[in-house]
Image (cartoon, rainbow, N blue to C red):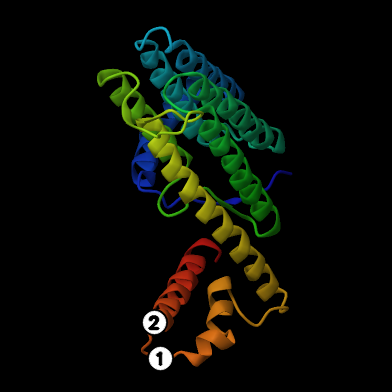
Amino acid sequence: MYKEEKKIDNTITSGVRKWLLKRYAKKVSKLFTPTSLNIIGLVGFIIAGICFALSSYNRFWLIGAALGVLIHLFTDEFDGEVARIRKVTSEHGYYMDHMLDMVGLLFVFTGLGISPLMHISIAFGLVILYYIMSINVFLTTYVIGNFQISFVKMGPREIRLLIVLFTLISMIADYPTVLFNSGVKWIGNITLFDAIGFVCLFALTVIVVHTITNTIYYLKRFEKTYKVSSFFEFVQRTQFMKRLGNNHPVKRMGKRLVAWDKKFHNNQLK
């Protein structure tokens, strides 16, 4: 018997999602099965990737790319709720849902990398980091039982909405929207998507390192192996930090990080 994991969704749009599910989920469940929604979502991502690539010839292909991402967003929000309404939740559905998401994501960012919108190295860097993040989420679900899809009020839903937003901006503004020239031959111009990609690469790297290290400390604390609850608390207990006075700016910042970290994990891992 499939036991559904505890889903943690504290993103900035989670309230809107709950309202939409409450209002329309039963209607959608009469029209689609969870499997059909998964397949339609994959088709949406494939369409988006192809349209991004074709935008090299005509910017109006970006309309198709935005619609493809929105199609996947719609299906991904409703497939789980439809499965619960129809009482057909299963390991098969869980696996198919997330596996098709990973495949579809590769199409989207490959299309972005082929297009003039984003350098292909940034596109594949984002895919790799997203996959690492997903692996961490799935393993954390297995060992702890919490399926955490939100980090710092952001999740897959917000990422797709941002892709749609900046796609439409790139279509309306000069295509591609070039911010400046890097001065490096193999990089060339830095576009709007490149700049956003750089920010996302940095943010995802920080989130991945933080969540992985703190999940390890959480599990070790649960097993009573470590005497500290997080990496930040470990740093606070080093000899260097102990030599600093209580009013030292570095020491105060360390205390704030420890307090924030404990609050974060009380909300995410309880």
Query: Disc 1 designates what residue?
Result: 246
Quadrant in the rendering for residue 104: top right
Under mark 2, the amino acid is Arg
**What crowding class fits label 1: few (fewer than 14 Cα within 10 Å), some (14-19), or many (20 or more)?**
few
Answer with mark 1 or mark 2, whichever residue precedes in sequence. Answer: 1
Picture coordinates of residue 267, whole percent (x, y): 47, 64
Mark seen at residue 180 = none
Furthest toward the top, the residue is 57
Position of 126 with respect to 24 (left or right) is right
Position of 44 with respect to 96 (left or right) is left
**What crowding class fits label 2: few (fewer than 14 Cα within 10 Å), some (14-19), or many (20 or more)?**
some
Query: Disc 2 designates what residue?
Result: 252
Position of 186 with respect to 70 (left or right) is right
Looking at the rendering, in which quadrant would you find the C terminus?
Answer: bottom right
Picture coordinates of residue 224, whole percent (x, y): 71, 79
Q: Is residue 46 above or below residue 147?
A: above
Position of 260 with respect to 33 (left or right) is left
Picture coordinates of residue 219, whole percent (x, y): 68, 68
Q: Secondary structure at mark 1?
A: loop
Query: Does residue 111 show up?
Result: yes
Looking at the rendering, in which quadrant would you find the N terminus?
Answer: top right
Query: Who's the residue at 58% across and 57% down the image?
Result: 209
Query: Which of the two residues, 164 or 146, is positioned nearer the viewer here?
Result: 164
Query: Who's the residue at 35% across and 21% down the image?
Result: 176
Picture coordinates of residue 50, whole percent (x, y): 51, 14
Q: Is residue 38 above or below residue 89?
A: above
Query: Does residue 150 show up?
Result: no
Q: Is residue 107 above or below residue 129?
A: above
Q: Is residue 186 above or below residue 233?
A: above
Tell me the CA gap for discs 1 and 2.
7 Å
Query: Which of the two residues, 80 or 169, is positioned nearer the viewer here?
Result: 169
- For the residues labelled 1 and 2, say whether their Cβ atoms are less than 8 Å apart: yes
